[in-house]
């Protein structure tokens, strides 16, 4: 007689209870994936033994397989909490420099501004041009944000304007000989202003005024008004002209290469007092959206690309993983895009604890990408993926495993009683 079957059953049931207990213990662990014990029959075999006549010698745990099903998403409201809705893993770099992957998106910022996990692994993403919002590289890098110091000031280089000049306007100089006389139109009638910034982030208000000329479809552009109170009086000169065709579409000034479209150049002197004696700088005024139609003068858009220094005030992550940052100077810009990874065989990943996995030969190499790209899922900011453990099912499984353990123990007890009977025979 053999105790092998009962002992193997006890070992397998004990391992099953370990797996179930591990699942239950992690029912509230963010991004946790439940496991299950998978059993296999053990048989004895010998060379030349006919099929079907091998002796069964019990059971073994063939594998403890993780179940990579989607967990529920819980709304947290924390902008640094990120969940993946669909396929993919967040890409990490461990403190020792090796790569790892996780579904737990409860990220933090450390004192150096690095986006990290609770175990201090760095979250990886793709570099992005803050101006265009387009990726500038194909290799993921650690996501770092300027928390220790403000972003530097940026000098204004471009003003973008969109407005309509009234096609019904007459020559601004007036027509005194007409009956009745047409008075001159004050230069301030068609004007607008905006703040631009010098290289040290000091704001300078600039104005643009438009005066209809005697030439059809032509307007002079000024950056100041006449000053009759000065000695001698100051008479402003135009900085350029805007021309239109008979359909009200802009035809000039043509932008100087390498720029394209329609633009004029505005020379800006830093705001007095200018204690650091900063030089004047040029600003290109983009006029592509300017029109001349028979409606009143109206500015629909006027913005510029400069700003003063600013501290980080907020972070928001979009569905495609693009990380948008907000600063105290009113600037919102892209700082990076979260990198996701996927595998041909997720069951082949090795669990290294701390809600992290590493790639193995069985999983294959990581396929990198970004959220919503190909078969990658979307990311949800302000949410976390819950554990996929079904507590009800685990409790039922635990009772089943307990019964199996008791039954296997009973087979050993019965074997022992039979053995004792044989030994005590006279």
Image (spheres, rainbow, N blue to C red):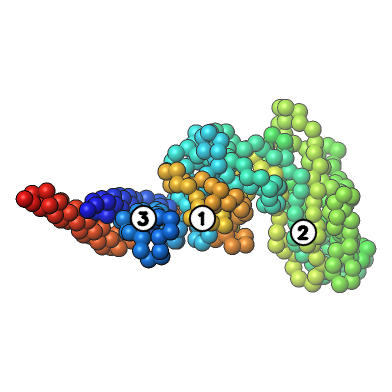
Q: Nearer the viewer, mark 1 or mark 3?
A: 3
- Which quadrant of the structure image shows residue 235? top right
User: First in sequence: mark 2 or mark 1?
Assistant: 2
- What residue do we see at 85% from left, 55% from top? 260
Give the residue furthest to the top.
276
Q: Are the residues tagged 1 and 3 within 8 Å (C-beta)?
A: no
Q: Nearer the viewer, mark 2 or mark 3?
A: 3
- Disc 2 residue crowd, few under 14, some 14–19, many 20+, Cα 10 Å: some
> Closest to the observer: 59 or 279?
59
Task: Quickly name the residue at label 3.
Answer: 44
- What residue do we see at 66% from left, 45% from top? 139
Can you give x and y, in whole percent of width and height, for residue 35 in the image?
38, 55
- Which quadrant of the structure image shows residue 53? bottom left
> Closest to the observer: 127 or 248?
127
Q: Compared with residue 216, is residue 385 higher up or lower down, i.e. above or below? A: above
Looking at the image, residue 426 sits to the left or right of residue 74; the answer is left
Task: Quickly name the residue at label 1.
Answer: 346
Residue 189, numbered label: none
Task: Quickly name the residue at label 2.
Answer: 190
User: First in sequence: mark 2 or mark 3?
Assistant: 3
Q: Nearer the viewer, mark 2 or mark 1?
A: 1
User: First in sequence: mark 1 or mark 3?
Assistant: 3
- What residue do we see at 71% from left, 55% from top? 302
Looking at the image, residue 250 sits to the left or right of residue 60; the answer is right
Whole-Å distance between the Cαs marked 2 and 3? Answer: 98 Å
- Which quadrant of the structure image shows residue 205? top right
- Disc 1 residue crowd, few under 14, some 14–19, many 20+, Cα 10 Å: some
Q: Count of labels shown?
A: 3
Q: Are the residues tagged 2 and 3 within 8 Å (C-beta)?
A: no
- What residue do we see at 15% from left, 51% from top? 419
């Amino acid at each position: 007689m053999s105790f092998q079957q009962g002992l193997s059953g006890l070992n397998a049931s004990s391992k099953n209870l370990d797996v179930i207990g591990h699942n239950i213990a992690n029912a509230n662990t963010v991004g946790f994936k439940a496991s299950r014990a998978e059993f296999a029959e053990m048989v004895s075999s010998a060379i030349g033994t006919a099929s079907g006549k091998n002796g069964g010698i019990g059971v073994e745990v063939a594998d403890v397989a993780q179940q990579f099903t989607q967990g529920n998403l819980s709304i947290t409201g924390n902008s640094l909490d990120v969940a993946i809705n669909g396929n993919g893993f967040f890409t990490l770099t461990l403190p020792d420099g090796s790569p790892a992957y996780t579904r737990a998106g409860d990220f933090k910022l450390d004192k150096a501004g690095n986006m990290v996990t609770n175990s201090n692994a760095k979250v990886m993403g793709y570099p992005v041009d803050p101006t265009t919002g387009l990726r500038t590289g194909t290799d993921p890098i650690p996501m770092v944000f300027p928390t220790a110091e403000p972003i530097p000031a940026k000098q204004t280089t471009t003003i973008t304007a969109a407005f309509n000049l009234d096609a019904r306007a007459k020559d601004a100089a007036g027509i005194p000989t007409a009956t009745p006389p047409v008075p001159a139109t004050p230069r301030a009638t068609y004007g607008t202003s905006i703040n631009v910034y010098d290289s040290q982030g000091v704001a300078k208000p600039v104005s643009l005024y438009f005066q209809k000329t005697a030439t059809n479809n032509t307007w002079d552009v000024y950056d100041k008004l006449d000053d009759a109170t000065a000695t001698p009086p100051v008479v402003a000169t135009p900085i350029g002209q805007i021309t239109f065709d008979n359909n009200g579409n802009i035809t000039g000034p043509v932008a100087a290469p390498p720029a394209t479209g329609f633009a004029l150049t505005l020379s800006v002197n830093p705001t007095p007092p200018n204690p650091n004696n900063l030089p004047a700088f040029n600003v290109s005024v983009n006029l592509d959206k300017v029109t001349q139609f028979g409606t009143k003068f109206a500015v629909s858009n006027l913005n510029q690309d400069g700003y003063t220094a600013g501290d980080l005030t907020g972070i928001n992550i979009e569905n495609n993983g693009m990380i948008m940052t907000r600063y105290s100077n009113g600037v919102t810009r892209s700082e990076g895009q979260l990198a996701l990874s996927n595998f041909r065989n997720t069951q082949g990943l090795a669990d290294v604890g701390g809600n992290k996995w590493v790639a193995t030969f069985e999983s294959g190499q990581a396929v990198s990408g970004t959220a919503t790209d190909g078969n990658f899922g979307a990311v949800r900011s302000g949410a976390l993926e819950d554990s996929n453990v079904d507590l009800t099912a685990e409790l039922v499984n635990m009772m089943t495993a307990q019964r199996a353990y008791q039954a296997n123990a009973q087979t050993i007890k019965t074997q022992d009683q039979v053995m004792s009977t044989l030994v005590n025979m006279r």
